[in-house]
Amino acid sequence: MISRLLGRRKASQRRGNPLTGLTVPPGAGLLICRVLDPVGEPVSLAEFTLHDSHSRKVVSGEADPYGLVVAMVPFGKYRLAVSAEGFAPYRDSIPVTDDGGPTGPRDITLQIAPSLPLPDPGEWEIEQAHTRIGFAARHIGLAQVHGRFNNFAGAIRIGNTIEDSAMHVVIDAASIDTNVQMRDDHLRSADFLDVEHYPTMEFYSDRFVHRGGNTWAITGGFTLHGVTRTVTLDANYGGMRVGMEGETRLAVNATTELHREDYTINWKTMLARGIAVVGSNIKVDLDIQIVPKGTQLKFK
């Protein structure tokens, strides 16, 4: 495949080399491997990270659509970590040496991640005291401003299979909280949420798709500012526990990204060089605990 990738020689000098034109600097080598599933199919977009012997991250990225990972790094010993949705993580020690060829385990086979026990069918509800509906938006292109909604309610019907389940969540738009009163008042105004005319936000879904392991896609309609769009929550099921009062609890973390212009929230003030004061993309992060419907709790 590649017989020499050292010094300043070019891979194009070797017939049949897939890395034609690539120059490898002196003192560096290539790590090359493919990421496969248990039946030998490539795992596209698998994430990889390479740490050196001092636990410093050297390089990270994603496998290509054919599961190929290529990294050029200085000679040395490295710790390779590979992960993908629905699969158990892979870790191994990899030396990159001056041996006249590419380094790597060639093929990495990821194993399906074990799944946590799922709940029995029934009616559940969000336990507000241990649930957070948070968001983040970029401010003047520099950093994220974080906030949350303090008032909400949600019902979840778990079917005979999780795929037959449904959920409905209602959020009080006026309960937005970024820890700055003036900013919160502006976000409640007609420039943004316009809570006088649109007092609630709602999400309804009856499409739960298992992605493998403990990961799920929850797709449904999200209504904001009088507009409904289809969104997908990337959900990670955290399992079941018994709480302090003997109640059963389930935990789920979910994320998604919204574009406020999709919901006709178009307020813009620009700085010099066309930088928006408030970014268009809103990252949403949900940490949810649910309990059986009607559960009475003395201590939250």
Image: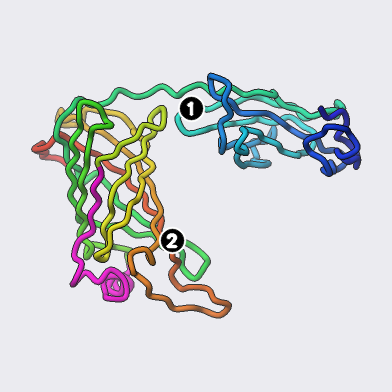
Residue 248 is marked as: none
- Residue that appears at 82% across and 40% down: 20
Q: Residue at left 43%, top 65%?
A: 280
- Mark 1 nearby-residue class (10 Å; few <14, some 14–19, many ≥20): many
Q: Is the residue 148 above or below the residue 211 in the image?
A: below
Quarter assignment of residue 175: bottom left
Range of magenta residues: 180-205
Residue 104, position as x, y percentages in the image: 72, 26
Q: Residue 37's spot in the image, x, y percent?
A: 54, 24
Can you identify the residue that label 1 sits on? 87
Instruction: Quarter of the image for the C terminus: give it.
Output: top left
Query: Total marks drawn?
Result: 2
Identify which amino acid the numbered label 1 is placed on: Phe
In the image, residue 108 lies in the stretch drawn in magenta: no
Q: Position of residue 75 (x, y in %)?
A: 80, 34
Q: Which residue appears at 91% of the width and 40% of the height?
A: 9
Query: Which residue is disc 2 drawn over?
Result: 281
Q: Please tell me which of labels 2 and 1 falls first in the chain.
A: 1
33 lies left or right of 110: right
Is residue 195 highlighted in magenta? yes
State the SS at label 2: strand
Query: As rendered, which of 74 and 165 lies closer to the eye?
Result: 165
> Picture quarter containing residue 172?
bottom left
